[in-house]
Each structure stands twice: as C-alpha cells, then as structure tokens.
Amino acid sequence: MSSRIEQIIEEIEEYIDSCKPQTLSKANIIVNKEEIEELLRELRMKTPEEIKRYQKILANKNAILADAQAKADAIIKEANIHTNELINEHEIMQQAYIQANELVEAAAQQAQQILDNATIDANNIRMGAMQYTDDMLGNLQNIIQHAMDSHAAKYESLMASLRNCHDIVNTNRRELAPTINGDSLEPEEE
C-alpha cells in the first residue's frame, strides 16, 4: 500500500505526462500553474502526516522498551523471592545465593538483549523513515529542477528568436536607408 505522498507524486508525474507539448517542441510542455501548485501544496500538507506516522512507529519503541523493563523487573523480583526462600534454610544458603545470582544475571542479560533488539528495531525504522522522506524530497527536487530547466530553455529560445527578429529588422532598415535618404547610398548610422 503506497503512502499519500507517493500517490501525490504519481499524480504530479501523470499530470506532467498529460500536459500538451509546447508548439514545435518535443521536450517542453505547457503546465497549468494552478494545478501543479495545488498538487505541490497537497504534498507539503501530507508530508507532516507521514512523519507523524513514522513517529508513532518510533513511539512503539518506548512501549517495547517498557515491556522489556517490566519483564526484567518481574524476573528480578521472582529471583529475589526465590533467593529469600532459599536463604531461610541454612543448609542450602550457599546454593541459593549462587542460583539467585545466576537468575539475576540471566534476567539482566535477557533484559539487555530485549532492550538491544528493541533499540536496533527502532533505529532501523527511524532510518527507513528518514530514507523514505529523503527519497520523496529527492523526487520533488527533480520535478522542480526539471520545471526550472524547462522554463530556462523556453526563455533562452524566446530571447534567441527576439534577437533574430531584431537583426532582421535592423538589416531591413539598413537596406531601406538609401531609398529613404534620397540620393545617399550609405545607410544612416544608428
């Protein structure tokens, strides 16, 4: 199931694909500014929702850690109770002490392992969320760069066309200059 951000990016791509090409151009398209701005606005609004979703996932880390701590506390409490029962009998006091220490050590190791696994899982989820957000922002950056490049090319094409028209008009005026100025065969200097 894709996120709403991915759906919006697909809509932007589909919209760009559906745009009419600019006259005499295979690469440039005509974009309705309002439509593309609306899609970009929606993308900006949805991005925080996606981040909140990943924050909830990270918040589960705390629940996992709390559960691990509760289990460790229960194991330690059980070990302490067991230790107290063993200590009540004098003959097995040494063995009770050893067993209690082993239980406490095992509980501490198990609790540490649970905490370590939960921390690794939470870090993996966080890194995945950050990578996903970076990928989405990279896609958006590419779309914006493409739009900027497209507009720059259109501007350069327009300026070249205007320069060409200016040169033609200037040449035509120079050719007409002898006729307008009477007998003079030299065109007027500009």
Image (spheres, grey):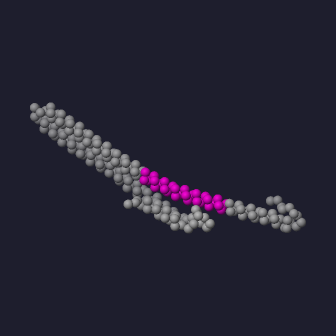
**Residue 45 colored magenta?**
no
Left or right: residue 41 versus residue 23 is left
Q: Is residue 110 above or below residue 49?
A: above
Residue 164 image point, x, y percent: 71, 62
The answer to whether any part of residue 42 appears in the image is no
Quadrant the N terminus occupies: bottom left
Residue 149 image point, x, y percent: 58, 57
Residue 128 image point, x, y percent: 40, 51
Left or right: residue 47 versus residue 144 is left
Q: Which residues are magenta?
A: 131-159
- Relative to the observer, which residue lies in front, 168 or 188? 168
- Relative to the observer, which residue lies in front, 116 or 33? 116
Q: Residue at x 18, y 34 (%)?
A: 98
Q: Residue at x 62, y 66 (%)?
A: 24
Q: Residue at x 68, y 60 (%)?
A: 160
- Relative to the observer, which residue lies in front, 167 or 115? 167
